[in-house]
Amino acid sequence: MCGIVGYVGPKEAQPILIDCLKRLEYRGYDSAGIAIGGDEINVYKTEGEIAVLEAGMPQMPGVVGIAHTRWATQGRPTTENAHPFQGCEKGVAVVHNGIISNFMELRESLAGDGHNFSSETDTEVFAHLVEAELKEDSDLLETVRIALKRVEGTYAFAVVAPGRPEVVAARNESPLVIGVGNGENFLASDVTALLKYTNRIIYVQDGETVRITKDSVTIMDADGAEVKRAPERIAWSLEDAEKGGYPHFMLKEIFEQPAAIHDSFLGRIDAVEGDEPFLDGGSFSSVKIVACGTSYNAGLVGKYIIEELARVPVTVQISSEYRYSAAARENPLVVLITQSGETLDTIAAAREATKRGNRTLAIVNVTGSAITREVDHVIYTRAGPEIGVAATKTFVTQLVALYLLAIELGTMGRTLTAQAKRSIVGQLRNLPRSVQDVLNQAGTIEAMAQKYSGARDMFFIGRNLQYPIAMEGALKTKEISYIHGEGYPAGELKHGPLALLSKDTPVVAIVTNDRTYEKMIANISEVSARGSPVIAIADANDTEIIKYADDVIFLRETPSLFSPVPVIVALQLWAYHLAKARGCPIDKPRNIAKTVTVE
Ligand code: G6P
């Protein structure tokens, strides 16, 4: 995820672009840059936050420009990899949000034609593609459309070219809006960036290419036909807008999950097909997953996924415990999961694993974070910045990374046939849709959560893969709603916790359709017999469940290996609405922090 802005008008573009860009810093902040147009295009960019860019840049006169704040996905967060990119010095400049999945192929072909590249990024190839197509008398919008025909992936691009008082932009699955002003026009990744200047907004749609000049807006659809779309008036305050109109970052991040999941596997399916493996050979007898908090719960789900697909034994340990445990006689691949990449306990565990001579792999969201320098291999989850303290989209993308890793291990160990792999990859591709289905039910989940929001204690039960999801549901609930939530394997209730159940302790039971279904029904009957209300999460085609539960959240049936993903999204919404009904400070719960750098 990155933020882009563009401006054409009568005023100096530089201060306006920087001002707008600052409002997009929540989309990424590892490097930033600006390009100002005129007879030639001048670019200034740097590693670090927008404040670093602002402090270092020279005055750049001109009334046309684009700017970018980056959240690195392809290539490290360095000055060389910062946007904008130019096809040649002082030439066409491009900023991009998204991922060009066929960039290696394009890069090779352009290099063959004599183009030189200065960065590790996918975006740079687009600057060269436009440069290669642009002739003195050609139309920039048309040229961008021609260049886009060769691009696969997701994008919002903005482009400026020498001697042209216009910004051209295009969108495919990455957000892009036009701000319509008086004698000036704007482009941005979202409305937030522009509200100080205008509240008249046109939402650009997928497949569209647009041009803004100081007094015109042109929109072309994918077939090259002109589209007329009037601006909408936005009634948000600046603060609302930063959250994209959501009352909390957590809710916004919950709703970003279909896109985050999509981004996290985009271009990677080929990797697991063998072209670009995460691990380059080497042998290990087992996998040991080490993590804290929500990342630990992802690791627990990972155990089931890897054992199922790759038949490799997996143990999961809390980082602060691993460090002080004895090294057993084994040679595991140590997988460290951490969204921030800065959790000290997990970094210390990575060092300990290296000391023990084990190969290490980190699953991490923040590019260039501390842990990436401690391990042999990295899988980035590409969820974009997560601001709410309670992890949501970083958790589901950690699961995606674990599916991909399991597929690779299954392929290496020959436990997965090519046909089984194809079917699993197909199911993975369906995940954004099943998550969207859950989000469409947010209203129902809210009403149900309100009903139970007075509880002091709550149990969450599941079996098999859904047991760690019950733990994660309980963790989300306690972190943000301050209700004491306890996650249990359903079969363990009778070994203690049943003593605590009464009509005042609701039990959330994950009863999706898998081989543990009958056992789960027996468990919830035990619970009901103690008078506890049962809230079941079940498949949409389950007609029996209503006999056993007081309330049911129905989800579209998903193959059992993948159903943890939609189920956790339902539980995130559940925890969120419990917290909201109780008036809790959802994005910043008491006593806990997003990144924990103490042991
Ligand atoms: C803190 C956060 C949790 C997070 C945990 C691990 O406790 O509040 O939400 O799961 O750290 O963080 P990491 O960055 O290593 O995933």
Image (tube, rainbow, N blue to C red):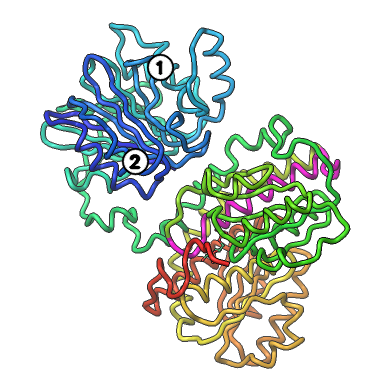
Image quadrant where one finds the N terminus: top left
User: Residue 314, percent across and down?
Assistant: 79, 58
Q: Which residues are magenta?
A: 388-417
Q: Quadrant of ligand 1?
A: bottom right
Q: Dot 1 lies on which element?
A: loop
User: Is residue 220 placed above or below 459 in the rendered structure?
Assistant: above
User: Residue 69, percent across and down?
Assistant: 37, 39
Q: Is residue 83 left or right of residue 470?
A: left
User: Which residue extends farthest front?
Assistant: 355
Please give the name of the residue rendered at 76% of the width and 57% of the height, measured from the top-left corner.
Answer: 288
* The disc label shown at residue 87, or none: 1
User: Residue 76, percent across and down?
Assistant: 51, 36
Image quadrant where one finds the C terminus: bottom right
Q: Chief secondary structure of the magenta span?
A: helix
User: Is residue 66 placed above or below 473 in the rendered structure?
Assistant: above
The 10 Å Cα crowd at callout 2, few under 14, some 14 to 19, many 20 or more, is: many
The residue where tag 2 is placed is 189
User: Residue 299, percent across and down?
Assistant: 68, 59
Please give the name of the residue rendered at 73% of the width and 39% of the height, measured from the top-left corner.
Answer: 279
- Asked whether residue 411 is drawn in magenta, I would say yes
Cα separation, mark 1 vs mark 2, equals 23 Å
What's under tag 2, amino acid-wise?
Ser
User: Is residue 467 placed above or below 418 in the rendered structure?
Assistant: below
What's under tag 1, amino acid-wise?
Gly
Q: Is residue 377 left or right of residue 137?
A: right
| Location of residue 468 by image quarter | bottom right
| Location of residue 567 by image quarter | bottom right
Q: Dot 2 lies on which element?
A: loop
The reply to whether residue 450 is in sight is yes
Q: Mark 1 or mark 2, which is nearer to you?
A: 1
